[in-house]
Image: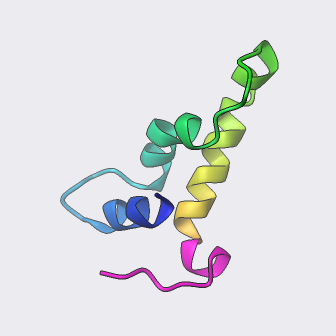
């Protein structure tokens, strides 16, 4: 999934950068088992984590992005 988001972010005509994609997909990728006030308050951290994974995919997963 992250590999796909990297490809989407790379498309210039898309206008969806890593930050916007992380906002849209972060809560779905890093969903807690149980929805609580604490998990709701941690959504920005989850989104930041997904954004980081998109930006540094090749380093984190040691794979070049296939085009």
Q: Nearer the viewer, residue 8 or 66?
A: 66
Against 26, residue 13 (above or below) is below
- Residue extending farthest left: 13
Decide whether the magenta segment is chiefly helix, strand or loop. loop
Against 21, residue 37 (above or below) is above
Q: Is residue 6 left or right of residue 60?
A: left
Against 55, residue 27 (above or below) is above
Snapshot quadrant of residue 51: bottom right
- Residue extending farthest top: 37
Residue 65 on the magenta span: yes
Residue 9 on the magenta span: no
The image shows residue 52 at horizontal and vertical percentages of 62, 59
According to the image, what is the colour scheme of the structure? rainbow
Please report the residue visible at 51 percent of the width from the left and 46 percent of the height from the top. Answer: 22
Q: Nearer the viewer, residue 5 or 15?
A: 5
Against 37, residue 6 (above or below) is below
- Residue extending farthest right: 38
Please report the residue visible at 63 percent of the width from the left and 80 percent of the height from the top. Answer: 59
The image shows residue 65 at horizontal and vertical percentages of 43, 80
Q: Is residue 59 left or right of residue 33?
A: left
The quadrant in which the C terminus is found is bottom left
Q: Which residues are magenta?
A: 57-67
The image shows residue 56 at horizontal and vertical percentages of 59, 71
Please report the residue visible at 46 percent of the width from the left and 55 percent of the height from the top. Answer: 18
Q: Is residue 4 left or right of residue 29?
A: left
């Amino acid at each position: 999934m992250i590999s796909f988001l990297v490809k989407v972010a790379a498309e210039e005509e898309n206008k969806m950068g890593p930050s916007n994609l992380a906002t849209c997909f972060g809560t779905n990728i890093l969903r807690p088992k149980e929805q609580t006030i604490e998990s709701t308050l941690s959504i920005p951290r989850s989104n930041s984590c997904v954004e980081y994974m998109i930006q540094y995919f090749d380093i984190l997963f040691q794979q070049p992005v296939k085009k």
